[in-house]
Amino acid sequence: VGKNLDNIIDHAKKKSALGHASSMLNWDSSVNMPKGGAVVRNETLSQLSVMQHQMRVLKEIPHWIEGARQELPLENFSDEKRLWWKKNLKLMEKSYKQSTLFTDEFVQRESQCALDCEVKWRTLRAENNWHDFAPYLEKVVAITRESAQIRAKAFNLSPYNALLDQFEQDLREEDFIGIFNELKQKLPDMIQIVVAKQKSRKMPSLEGNYPILKQKELGLELMKMVGFDFDHGRLDVSLHPFCGGVSRDIRMTTRYNEKDFSDSLMGVLHETGHAKYEQNLPTEWGNFPIGNAPGMIVHESQSLFMEMQIARSAEFVQLIAPIIKKHLDFPLGMQELQTAYKKVEPGFIRVDADELTYPMHVILRYELEKAMIMGDLQVKDLPGAWNEKMQNYLGISTLGNDRNGCMQDIHWPSGGFGYFPCYTLGAIMAAQLKVGLERAVPQMNKQILAGDFTQVDQWLDTNIWSRGSFYNYQELLTHATGKKLGLDDYFTHLKTRYF
Amino acid sequence: VGKNLDNIIDHAKKKSALGHASSMLNWDSSVNMPKGGAVVRNETLSQLSVMQHQMRVLKEIPHWIEGARQELPLENFSDEKRLWWKKNLKLMEKSYKQSTLFTDEFVQRESQCALDCEVKWRTLRAENNWHDFAPYLEKVVAITRESAQIRAKAFNLSPYNALLDQFEQDLREEDFIGIFNELKQKLPDMIQIVVAKQKSRKMPSLEGNYPILKQKELGLELMKMVGFDFDHGRLDVSLHPFCGGVSRDIRMTTRYNEKDFSDSLMGVLHETGHAKYEQNLPTEWGNFPIGNAPGMIVHESQSLFMEMQIARSAEFVQLIAPIIKKHLDFPLGMQELQTAYKKVEPGFIRVDADELTYPMHVILRYELEKAMIMGDLQVKDLPGAWNEKMQNYLGISTLGNDRNGCMQDIHWPSGGFGYFPCYTLGAIMAAQLKVGLERAVPQMNKQILAGDFTQVDQWLDTNIWSRGSFYNYQELLTHATGKKLGLDDYFTHLKTRYF
């Protein structure tokens, strides 16, 4: 390859080495590290992050990209490889622009604001202390508005779209505003109907006594069954479950509740969806943007495909019921397990929400964060606005209960504005992919019943995993299902499951 | 502090971050990593090592050191701090000189030779295939001779001293040649006498059935008892036990033999000696040479102090006998356990050798490696020379058994020449420290019997741990015991224990 491509490849290798190290050290901090190791660990992580930033803003990068464009036609690359490089250079250019928009001083100030707010959040949330927390959040909102405006100007986008674009390539509010409006219109009624229906019959309880070691064995068996590659990953325990590591060495975590195995089980299957995606991204492009996911919608579509479309399906529950009984002393039958999984109940907490109420939590956050970013909502008015929307959307009050209201998520304290919509858009994408898959593999449900995920995985690999970021989320969906992101398949799914 | 000191501190922070990452990733590779993660992990480790090398040879360093020397008197440092900085700058200067002696091409070639030879060693040793292995070792010896000559010239040392100095600050052959000669003269006879004596009575066998989980609990309890700080470290399992991590977050490993608990137990206590030293090095100097051990003699003196002077002492065995019985189904008494620990038997393998035969393994290696480095012994003649010395020193033949002869250690294949003497010099230092300690803390043996290591640790901390590399091994010994390294206390120890 040419000199500029060489420089790019070399630089990416070094940057990936630092990324690999950070990723593993973060995993280690949650899983292994003795508490006295935190000071030097955090110093190390912060130094590694500074070095990564310095590599991202290296002045030579735009020249290398320009030079590489000249070199490309000369190479003995296949047409496809040349196309991938072309797209990759474009993504690199965008990423370079994003990294160089801000002065070091601004980056430092922004991350300090978020760090301070997050630290306060950890204690003040537990104390339900909105009063002391608000000033910190105000600072985060202020600097995020500033950063959104700078991004907006640079990329010729609205400030909120500029934030969205950080979390999912090419995501625009215009593409989902109609979707969210329709959800707002229809979901509250659907929730009421399902809740009323469920009140009339007894919901089975999953409570029992489930030893952690047995739950772990069960989780490992199911991970293996659905295709987690244990040559390139492992499962451990951490306080907050996540899927970390690197593509060729995934570090998944869970936590166990001895009284209820299904929390961990569904969590493990959800994270396995993320993990399989990462494990099957195109390895040869792993050091480059194009070899990674285009964003959080697509990533969530994979975890929610696994959790909502596969793991909670009738076929899958039938498949795993005997496996559960093999490991655990669980007295209920397949039917009751499935019923338990379908429980719908409006609640305070997003991460505990069921499939039907979850989107309302997301829409509420989207509306409030957008209003804060646009200057239409002051941080001081957040608790009131939150309560009002919770009343409207889910019929519950968070007055005086900010711990379980606007203080519940880590996203805003840590500066994550524009992320929330991805959760629900990912769920909708998952439902649409399932329909596309059923069309391509009509035997799919029979195969799942038999524990055979070969064709499911092949289809996902062809349409999503192996594509990296060659396509954005809309292009991926259009290629896979013939249409852009829409609600038809999602509503069909919800109606079939809950009505 | 001044601008140059600032630069030095900043640069050291960054270098330590990379060191921390490498260290933890190495630990993770041995303890957690799924096998498919090796390719990207090794790529990452190699990139991190290149970055560390680049930081070590940064052209500004000598100017910073020179500038810092000017800044020092101006600072509001204490006299002691100024002295430490002065010594630290000297150590940094030496380390910079060592790092910049070689061209990148040479460094690359040297590490490639060692890598190739080590890879071959892993399979060819198992196959007892000296014939195919020899050419690889020849290359390593050739480049090590080259490197030794370059170092020798730069530091005005003999080539072998230049190699020794890499592993222990200021270590010179002249300082231990008399020691090794006396050992050669006396040990073989002592071994014969003890072996004959032991033949006349039945040696108790430690064989039994010891569940791994129980062995682990036992090991953890004893680690805690002798002062391993679990807030700053942990114990895991790996194929080859080691003590890794960083000073504030030590990662120790062991492996378990279900038929014999004492292998792991003594291994754990040995590594705990290394670990306590690391955990108690002066934290505030951790990023600098002066905050680390002066070398492998001092490090081994700490692990062997724990293993040979403490753990195998009559008092300690009496202390732990009931604890062993608490965890394991172990039928023997204290007396028999102690007798078992004293078994002496000439054997092929250094790492399995007892306290009395171990030095002969080391002296043999010292003589052979020195001869190879000086050009007095050709690699092709190594098996013959090895066999001859084994016959002379331990009365056993390695003819046709190179796997258990000159191919047994990883040191030479990986380019480690000049390291072996440290093992035995460390053992001698440990015996000398024990006598110094008994003089300072006459109640020491009673305290050990009571499981109280407070004063032992205080003395070691004052005399060794807290000193970092402010003194070299001879200075440490002189301050602690009033004399340089010598054999008196060591022979007294051996005679008391084995005669």
Image (cartoon, coloured by chain):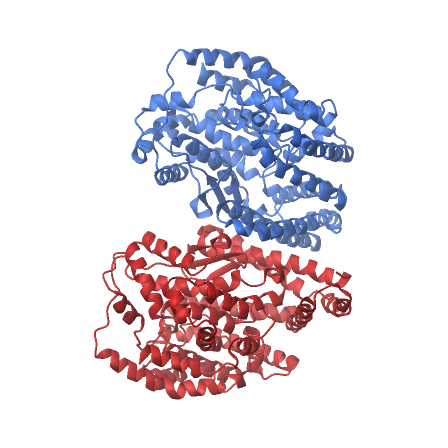
Chain colours: A red, B blue
Report whether A20 appears left or right of A217. right
Count of numbered marks: 0
Is residue B63 shown to the viewer in this render? yes
Q: Nearer the viewer, residue A35 or B459?
A: A35
* Residue B348 drawn at (x, y percent): 54, 23
* Residue A305 drawn at (x, y percent): 44, 70
**Rendered view: B43 above or below A154:** above
Quarter of the rendering occupied by the N terminus of chain B: bottom right
Q: Nearer the viewer, residue B90 or A217?
A: A217
* Residue A82 drawn at (x, y percent): 70, 68
Report whether A333 appears left or right of B145. left
Which residue does the image show at 54% across and 86% down from the upper left? A174
Q: Nearer the viewer, residue B436 or B413?
A: B413
* Residue A163 drawn at (x, y percent): 56, 77
**Rendered view: B325 above or below B50:** above
Q: Nearer the viewer, residue B272 or A117?
A: B272
Is residue B247 shown to the viewer in this render? no
Q: Quadrant of residue B343?
A: top left
Report whether B412 appears left or right of B443. right
Q: Quadrant of residue A360?
A: bottom left
Quarter of the rendering occupied by the C terminus of chain B: top left
